Amino acid sequence: MKFNTVGVIGIGTIGSGVVADLVLHGISVIAVDLSETALDRARAEILKAVRFAPMFAKGARKLTRDEALALITFTTRLEDVRACEFIVENVFEEWAVKQPLYRQLDEIAPAGVCFGANTSCISITRLGRATRRPDKVVGMHFMNPVHLMPTVEVIRGHHTSAETIANVTQLFAQLKKEAVMVGDLPGFVSNRISHVFMNEAAFVFQDGLATAAQIDAIFRKCFGHKMGPLETADLIGLDTVVRSLDVLYDSFQDPKFRCCPLLRKMVDAGECGIKSGRGFHAYPGASNQPRREPSS
């Protein structure tokens, strides 16, 4: 099947990127978040991504503001996703938030609709257990900026069916993205490795071995990374990194996932990275107030 309308629940940093990517490929979106303030902020981010996409992505569609907005319905009503053919969930990375949401979605969405969990670390099998359709729950871990990344980590839960995998593969074919299929344990592949990397970089900074600029420069200039580990943490959001590390530690009880105390202190101080204007680096043009990722 070809997807025409996709629901996106939680349109914070990654959720906005997912909406922009769908719109750039001609797919209509029902974009859901908790408040009009969150929707207004997301609308601005989506339009910015759509506007600049042709400058950075070869072959990206050129859409006017009105053309982009015509493809998006912004709403605070979760029940508005009832007409969607696929639903992508991007809400706050906490089980206490995700579990009731999946129960609600299970009641609202038609029986054949699949749920794509864009989660950082929480098990897809566990998320599926919160529904009566565990076979139709699949992990889809987008990277930022979504519309510029050609590959998505796709996580098969214990009950995820072949039909669901075929559906998500079709969706990514429409988005011109490759799906790399992996198994299901907390953190999957990318975050299980990358969060240890970012966490250890924070420990190195905390220990005074180098400045943040020096740490990032080593990985950009010596290893050819596009971004250093601390720049990456700032982009993701230090609050998100801390929550993900906590999920990994709780899941595996392995000390390698113990969150760096400095990371937690920075989050407590409101220094969450790009979205708050300061993290390991300063971002003068950004907001100076931290914000919680939207949830529904």
Image (spheres, rainbow, N blue to C red):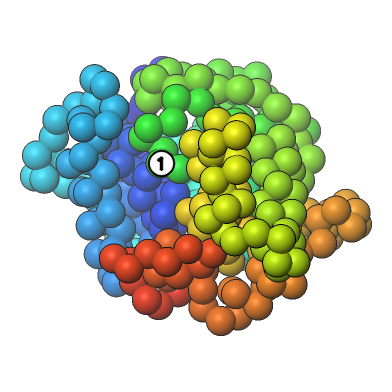
Is 82 situated above or below 282?
above
Q: Nearer the viewer, residue 143 or 176?
A: 143
Is 291 situated above or below 228?
below
Mark 1 residue element: loop
Residue 272: image location, x then y, percent = 52, 68
Q: Residue at x 29, y 65 (%)?
A: 285
Q: Quarter holding the N terminus?
A: top left
Query: Which residue is the site of mark 1?
Result: 145
Is 195 situated above or below 258?
above
Q: Residue at x 71, y 61 (%)?
A: 209
Q: Nearer the viewer, residue 53 or 103?
A: 53
In this picture, residue 19 sits left or right of residue 231: left
Q: Is disc 1 surrounded by few (<14), some (14 to 19) or many (20+) residues within 10 Å?
A: some
Residue 7 in view = no
Residue 151: image location, x then y, percent = 50, 26
Determine the image quadrant of residue 278.
bottom left
Residue 90: image location, x then y, percent = 50, 51
Residue 176 in view = yes
Say which amino acid is labelled 1: Pro
